[in-house]
Image (cartoon, rainbow, N blue to C red):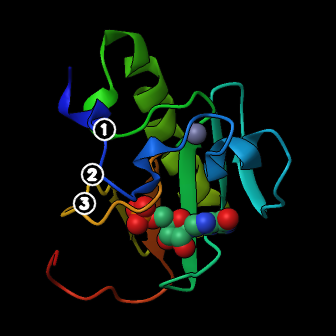
Amino acid sequence: MRLGRELFPGGEKEAGVEDCIFCRIVRGEIPANKVYEDERVLAFDDIHPMAPVHVIIIPKKHIATLLDVGCGEITDLQAMMAAAQEVARLKKVDKKGFRVVINCNEEGGQIVFHLHMHLLGGRKLRDGLN
Ligand code: 5GP
Ligand code: ZN
């Protein structure tokens, strides 16, 4: 069993595809302000933005964490990176700069257990990664 599939008691990691909040956004069951979409990826504004530009980029396929990316999911990760380039241009932070972050598991700060990338920009971001 891979680490990414372990369950944390009480954590959203136990949520299946049915309950997963980001899968529900993909299915259109929960509204989101969509920024970019293609056949593999969806990007939407974060509901609690931490910067003037704060976009969540997800694979449409349910992948719980970065550790669950195997050979079969590499294309999804690649598509997320390409989407980040496009989102940066669409949100006009490409010239001044931006940051992408993937939180993984509990100490990495992951709350939603559907793989996602944060794209942050629109102001000078603080130094440091903690
Ligand atoms: P994590 O801490 O798991 O890396 O980040 C999850 C992010 O998803 C948080 O920044 C949170 O604000 C965002 N988020 C959680 N639920 C929703 C939702 O229903 N809609 C949107 N747009 N963002 C959400
Ligand atoms: Zn999901």
Q: Is residue 123 above or below residue 60?
A: below
- For the residue marked with disc 1, what is the amino acid? Leu
Q: Secondary structure at mark 3?
A: loop
18, above or below 11, in the image: above
Residue 93 in view in this figure: no
Picture residue at 58% right of the left edge, 27% below the top: 61
Q: CA–CA distance between discs 1 and 3?
A: 12 Å
Identified by mark 3, the residue type is Glu
Of the two numbered discs 1 and 3 on the same chain, state the one appearing first in sequence.
Answer: 1
Residue for badge 2 = 104
- Mark 2, ligand 1, within 8 Å: the answer is no
Give the x, y percent position of residue 22: 63, 49
User: Dividing the picture into quarters, in which one does residue 27 lie?
Assistant: top right
**Viewer-side label of 2, 3:** 3
Q: Quadrant of the N terminus?
A: top left
Q: Mark 2 belongs to which amino acid?
A: Cys
> What is the CA distance from the residue labelled 2 to the residue labelled 3?
7 Å
The residue at the point 37 percent across, 20 percent down is 74
| Helix, strand or loop for disc 2 | loop
Q: Residue at x 46, y 31 (%)?
A: 63
Distance from label 2 to label 1 (Cα)? Answer: 6 Å
Q: Contact (CB < 8 A) between labels 2 and 1?
A: yes
Residue indicated by mark 1: 66
Which quadrant of the figure contains the C terminus? bottom left
User: Based on the displayed image, in which of its 4 quarters is residue 40 positioned?
Assistant: top right
Q: Nearer the viewer, mark 1 or mark 3?
A: 3
Instruction: Give the secondary structure at mark 1.
Output: helix
Please tell me how crowded label 1 is: few (under 14), some (14-19), or many (20+) other residues with Cα within 10 Å. some
Residue under pointer 3: 106
Q: Position of residue 49 (x, y in %)?
A: 56, 81
**Dot 3, how many residues are within 10 Å of its Cα: few (below 14), some (14-19), or many (20+)?**
few
